[in-house]
């Protein structure tokens, strides 16, 4: 008689596995389906780079805010109505200059200040970026379209604890007197990760 | 643990698949996974260190071939089974097939004692410790010397927090390393900064 317990089974698809987890939690009254609706909405509509773009634009036009942001990022973004998860106890804002390019990464997983700069793009979570950006940053940036002059110092920040980082890009030339919302529209997620610089409009 | 997740500086990986309009999600199930793990943390079923460690315990072959959200799903399901919320059998019945989970955990450890205090500008040396459980120390800085540039508020100590071991919260120090010191002769010049837990650091001469 065959040992039916040992029959080799196919591996379930990821969708089937997600269904399994969600339905198992729902059956225990743990509210999984409601959470998928609620947190799914937050992830797609609220945790977006527009938040960080507002922070950057404010820092460009308001020197006192810029100082507060660089001194204590978490408190400063709260002024703009932005929240960070409880376990993100610290937000370090890294100011780019003509001579310094800060770049953030997470080699051990894929941590970001997602409520501020948005959930990380796919490439940030890929093995290629995680493995290479700490060791061959200049080449990686060039491959991603940012060819930095040799005199620019690259500073890579590996998010290995629950401190979060965001890059404050340089304000592009030719934007004097622009209102904050128009400035914010120039700011990209890539610039807040540090793999891009903002071009003049 | 010296796991496959510890990718910083590993060689052989190809070009970053970068596009300016890259999205966070590519399928509805990815959004659902992200929500479900966040919900489980919010419910207190497990903490972030347990979650990260569960992903690190995946079979290396599976880890390298799974997408980010499949890794997240595997960590979530592993912890739900380990915490007794659901059995593997039930998950596999519901999923109508094998549900790959991560390998069991090894024991954790508490903070180092004593722990030194550091200020910006201090030179520090990173521990040579290697543990079977969770650790937030990328292998590429092990034993290396750098300079403190910042200090964080106190966080739960990962080596303990991922394993239900009692410990004190402790700060991390942002430590600046020269890439040429991390990979002598085979790194492009840059300053690499790592958030290093106090227990992993000692004063350097």
Image (spheres, rainbow, N blue to C red):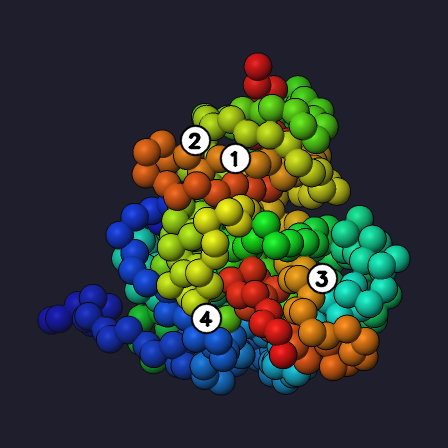
Chain identity of mark 2: B
Give the x, y percent position of residue B6: 41, 47
**Circle 3 SS class:** loop
The quadrant of the picture occupied by the N terminus of chain B is: top left
Residue at which label 3 appears: A85
Local SS, label 4: helix
**Lateral position of residue A180 relative to residue B29, left or right:** right
Label 3 and label 1: CA atoms lie apart by 29 Å
Report the disc number at residue A190: none
Q: Nearer the viewer, mark 2 or mark 4?
A: 2
In the rendered image, which residue does mark 1 sit on?
Answer: B177
Whether labels 4 and 3 belong to a single chain: the reply is yes
Residue displayed at 29% across by 60% down: B14
User: Mark 4 highlights which residue?
Assistant: A122
C-alpha gap between disc 4 and disc 1: 27 Å
Q: Nearer the viewer, mark 2 or mark 3?
A: 2
Read off the chain for label 3: A
List x then y, in percent, for residue A69: 79, 56
Q: Are marks 2 and 3 in contact (CB under 8 Å)?
A: no
Residue lying at the far front of the rendered structure = A174
Q: Which residue is mark 2?
A: B181
**Secondary element at tag 1:** strand
Query: Would you say the residues marked 3 and 1 are in contact, meaning their CB atoms lie under 8 Å apart?
Result: no
Q: Position of residue A27 (x, y in %)?
A: 57, 79
Say above or below: A171 vs A89. Answer: below
Whether residue A91 can be seen here: yes
Secondary element type, mark 2: helix
Give the residue at x 65% y 62%.
A169
Q: Give the label, 4 or 1, closer to the camera.
A: 1
């Amino acid at each position: 008689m065959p040992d039916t317990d040992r029959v080799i089974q196919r591996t379930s698809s990821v969708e089937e596995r997600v269904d399994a987890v969600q339905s198992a939690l729902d059956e225990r009254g743990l509210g999984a389906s409601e959470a998928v609706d609620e947190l799914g909405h937050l992830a797609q509509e609220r945790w977006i780079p527009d938040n960080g773009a507002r922070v950057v634009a404010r820092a460009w036009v308001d020197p006192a805010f810029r100082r507060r942001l660089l001194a204590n990022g978490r408190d400063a973004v709260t002024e703009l109505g932005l929240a960070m998860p409880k376990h993100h106890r610290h937000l370090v804002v890294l100011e780019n200059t003509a001579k310094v390019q800060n770049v953030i990464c997470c080699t051990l997983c894929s941590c970001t200040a997602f409520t501020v700069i948005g959930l990380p793009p796919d490439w940030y979570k890929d093995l290629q970026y995680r493995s290479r950006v700490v060791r061959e940053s200049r080449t990686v940036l060039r491959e991603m379209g940012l060819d930095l002059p040799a005199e620019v110092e690259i500073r890579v920040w590996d998010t290995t604890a629950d401190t979060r980082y965001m890059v404050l890009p340089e304000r592009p030339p030719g934007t004097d007197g622009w209102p904050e919302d128009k400035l914010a529209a120039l700011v990209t997620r890539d610039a807040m990760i540090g793999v891009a610089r903002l071009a003049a409009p | 643990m010296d796991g496959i997740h510890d990718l910083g500086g590993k060689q052989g990986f190809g070009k970053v698949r970068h596009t300016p309009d890259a999205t966070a999600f590519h399928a509805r199930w990815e959004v659902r996974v992200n929500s479900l793990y966040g919900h489980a943390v919010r419910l207190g079923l497990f903490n972030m260190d347990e979650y990260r460690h569960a992903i690190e315990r995946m079979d290396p072959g599976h880890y390298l071939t799974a997408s980010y959200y499949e890794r997240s799903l595997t960590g979530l399901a592993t912890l739900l089974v380990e915490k007794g919320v659901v059995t593997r059998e039930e998950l596999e019945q519901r999923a109508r097939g094998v549900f790959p989970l991560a390998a069991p955990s090894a024991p954790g450890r508490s903070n180092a004692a004593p722990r030194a205090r550091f200020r910006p500008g201090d030179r520090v040396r990173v521990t040579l410790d290697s543990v079977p459980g969770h650790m937030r120390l990328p292998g590429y800085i092990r034993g290396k010397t750098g300079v403190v540039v910042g200090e964080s508020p106190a966080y739960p100590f990962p080596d303990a927090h991922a394993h239900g071991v009692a410990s004190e919260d402790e700060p991390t120090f942002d430590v600046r390393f020269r890439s040429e010191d991390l990979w002598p002769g085979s790194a492009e010049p840059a300053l690499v900064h790592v958030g290093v837990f106090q227990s992993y650091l000692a004063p350097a001469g």
